[in-house]
Amino acid sequence: MEKVKMFSFLKNGAIEYLQSSLLNKCDFFIHSFCTRRGGVSQKNYASLNVSFGEGDEDSNVLQNWGRIAAAFTIPVEQFLVVNQVHEDGIFVVKPYGGYFSSRTELDYDAIVTDRADLAICVKTADCVPVFIVDRVKKVIAAVHAGWRGTALGISAKVVRLLLDNYGSSPQDILAAIGPSIGACCYEVDSSVANAFRNQKGHDKFLFAGKKADKWTLDLAEANQRQLLGCGVSEENIDLCDLCTACNQDLFFSHRGSGGMAGRQINFIMIEGQTPCLVLKGENDYSIQ
């Protein structure tokens, strides 16, 4: 079994994915940071593209979702995908009772729930997928953190919601930060850099570039700093060091592909028997 820091590569059928060994210490949920491998899509979308909004054929995307559902033995209707809009909105799913929302009502970039049998998802192609777990209260969160969401402090906002709404304690919170574009490949202009200058510890993730008015940004580290700032200990954070742009054989990369890329899925789900009714929102916006 190949190791990348504290992340392990695994395979269910044709589906290749990563798991955090830190999160695997908990037994009440399952999680997966999927790669782009194991699907049926072709060319720029090869092969496990899960987004309908990037130009891939709908029939291929549907087959890919079917493969994921079969690999993890989760009915496809139990995957919840919101309309990621690069902001800091959090969708809180209550533990019981049916719900049904229109796509326009699902404009969020994070999902929090203590409901069982609901696979909460984020789609990525360079942005940062973050899973946050309260191992005592048994609450989970999935966060999509592009540069705008990160600049708005979305990971910190999710932790504060757990503390305020669920009575979580920082020492009980675990987090896994999945594959995303690294500082090695993520050059930004001054307008983006300026959005981070007021964040504590920005000197740890924002660096002057080689060209005038250019900066390199480490989005994964920026999100880790937000978690640390909320009292989550470093030993409770698992950070993957795989860059999506450097590893396009494994991951979709919007920047690395020049904007022609699919999306991989990342999901986390509390295991149980609670039925749910969801609508998948498919409108996605790429990192810029």
Image: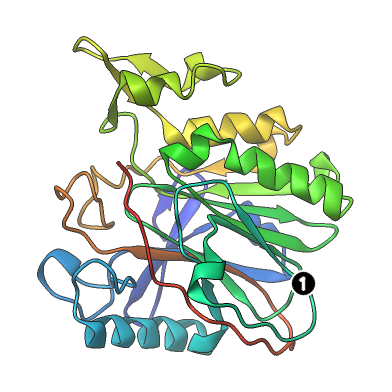
Seen from this angle, which residue lies furthest top? 212
Residue 41: give x, y in percent of width and height: 19, 77
Residue 270 lies, with reference to residue 182, above or below; the image says below
Which quarter of the rendered picture does the N terminus lie within?
bottom left
Left or right of 187, for residue 127: right
Q: Residue at x 45, y 58 (%)?
A: 84
Residue 174 lies, with reference to residue 211, above or below; the image says below
Q: Residue at x 32, y 42 (%)?
A: 243
Viewer-proximal residue among 236 and 202? 202
Q: Residue at x 48, y 23 (%)?
A: 196
* Residue topped by disc 1: 94
Which quarter of the rendered picture does the C terminus lie within?
top left
Seen from this angle, which residue lies furthest right? 167
Residue 26: give x, y in percent of width and height: 72, 62
Where disc 1 sits, the SS reads loop
Viewer-proximal residue among 18 and 52? 52
Q: Quadrant of residue 188?
A: top left
Residue 285: give x, y in percent of width and height: 35, 55
* Residue 267 visible in the current orientation: no
Query: Dot 1, how many residues are within 10 Å of its Cα: few (below 14), some (14-19), or many (20+)?
Result: few
* Three-letter code, disc 1: Lys
Left or right of 30, for residue 213: left
Residue 108: give x, y in percent of width and height: 55, 58
